[in-house]
Image (spheres, coloured by chain):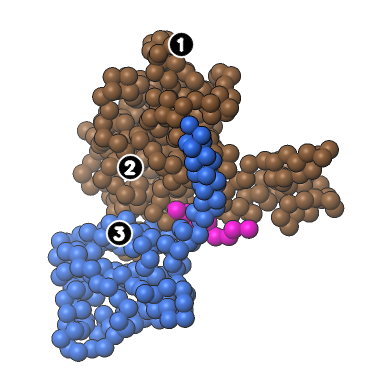
Amino acid sequence: MSTKPKIAFYWCASCGGCEESVVDLAEDVLMVLDAVDIVLWPVAMDFKKKDVEAMADKSIVATLLNGAIRSSEQEEMARLLRRKSQVLIAYGSCAHTGGIPALANQFSHEQIMKYVYEDAPTVVNPANASAVGAGASKTRPVTVCQDNGREPTLPVIRNVVRALDQVVDVDYYIPGCPPTPKLLKEAVLALLSGKLPPKGSVLAPDMALCEQCPRIDSKPQDLSLTEFKRPHQVIIDPDKCLLAQGLLCMGPATRGGCEARCITGNMPCTGCFGPTSRVHDHGAKILSYLASTAAGKEDKDIEKTLAGIPDPVGTFYRYGLAKCMLRGKVTSHE
Amino acid sequence: MSKTNGNWEPRIVAFFCNWCTYTAADLAGVSRMKYAPNVRVIRLMCSGRLDPQFIMMAFAKGADGVLIGGCHPGDCHYVEGNYKTLRRMDLLKRMLKDLGIEENRVRLEWISASEGDRVKWAINDIVEKVRALGPLDMPGKFKDWDKEIEELEAKVAATEEVATDAH
């Protein structure tokens, strides 16, 4: 039997982009495959849950789990993989801070189900007298049903979308939507060499993106913004600080290490790497910075400038609502 | 202490700047003015030091309301600090509303060192408004939200125990 260290990849509430980033290792993926045994990777290989269950506890050296935790099935897999792994790594924004799926925490379970299964313009779901599900007149998914004497079940969708460490103990975090191949490679090398930082570390540089930004020299000391513009409203100067051009860039309060990829692509930072270690609440911190740069000393001038940020929650917590200190506007629990 | 039982009392965290509002609160004290005892005052050197994280943490840890006091516009000891607060509060209030925190739970007041009576008024007023809104109780809400994962956690723990015994 192979004695190579065992590695598992798993996905929960995610889009598949994190899996893509593994493939983006390009030829380095061969180096990784040479050095480790992959024991679970649902997107690419045929292993089953029972194969993992059959392994001894802590026999997997590391599991890289991407995606937020949103259903009972994901919770169960997270717990199983935690138990079988020496090191559990939250891989990507969703596992790290909730990611895009966590924006659902602004809505109740009922609001989401109603929209997705009844109200969305692309949905065809005629009224149905025999419909089942909470208060439904139209067909909704149910978690248990009867079928020829069997009772098949579906996982339960939770009311709250959670980051991985809000469900199980997490050893390390690799940030990004998706993480860069460089960070993944560095993490794998660190795992193989056993030279790991203290538990709980985010495996990326602990400094704000601005410090690594190629445009830092054109960032003015005092921004005094009179307007926040969206990228499609301006022809963006490819060399000048995006904030100085009135674009809402989250670089000042977002962790670097992404090689400033969006900036290099002439787009502002949207904050996927999350906060640095000194910040408790990413959204509050970027709000603090951006709002204080608004020009004007009168309520009406300030309001006019800040009206350019119509959805502060969606903007500042695009990738991190699960980690917001107030955790989103979850109001009802049917 | 102030839980959701019949004896609930609003719990207000107040952030006062050292040079104006905190001094005014001192003045209210030495003038023996009486105001609602629901406020815990935290002194900051400037209202501009008030990181929006502080306000969010106050709510997350169980505050029912947050009162912020700074120097009048133009009077800031550090020239610009209170303007920064004004701008941050504009956006933060909007964001807190989107996060389900009612507008009346947060308020910003400019109170100079000589306005002890205004401290009294501001405190009484926010206590009254928050009392009308009722308890916010974020810690209780978080606990409630996390109940949904406890059942599975217990179930998995039980099967793990069985598995461990079998080894």
Q: Position of residue A308 (x, y in %)?
A: 43, 50
Q: Is residue A246 above or below residue A193?
A: below
* Chain A rendering hue: brown
**Residue marked by disc 3:** B54
Tell me the CA gap for discs 2 and 1. 42 Å
Identify the residue shown where x is 49% and y is 41%. B161
Residue A226 visible? The answer is no
Question: Do the residues marked 3 and 1 share a common chain?
Answer: no
Where does residue A171 sit, x and y in percent of width and height?
Answer: 35, 35
* Residue at mark 2: chain: A
Which secondary structure, mark 2?
Answer: loop
Q: Calculate the distance from the C-alpha at mark 2 to the C-alpha at mark 3.
A: 16 Å
Q: Mark 3 falls within which chain?
A: B
Q: Percent from the top left, x then y, of residue B11?
A: 36, 73
Residue placed under numbered mark 2 in the picture? A275
Residue A65 is labelled as: none
Q: Nearer the viewer, mark 2 or mark 1?
A: 1
Q: What span is colored magenta in the figure? A: A327-334
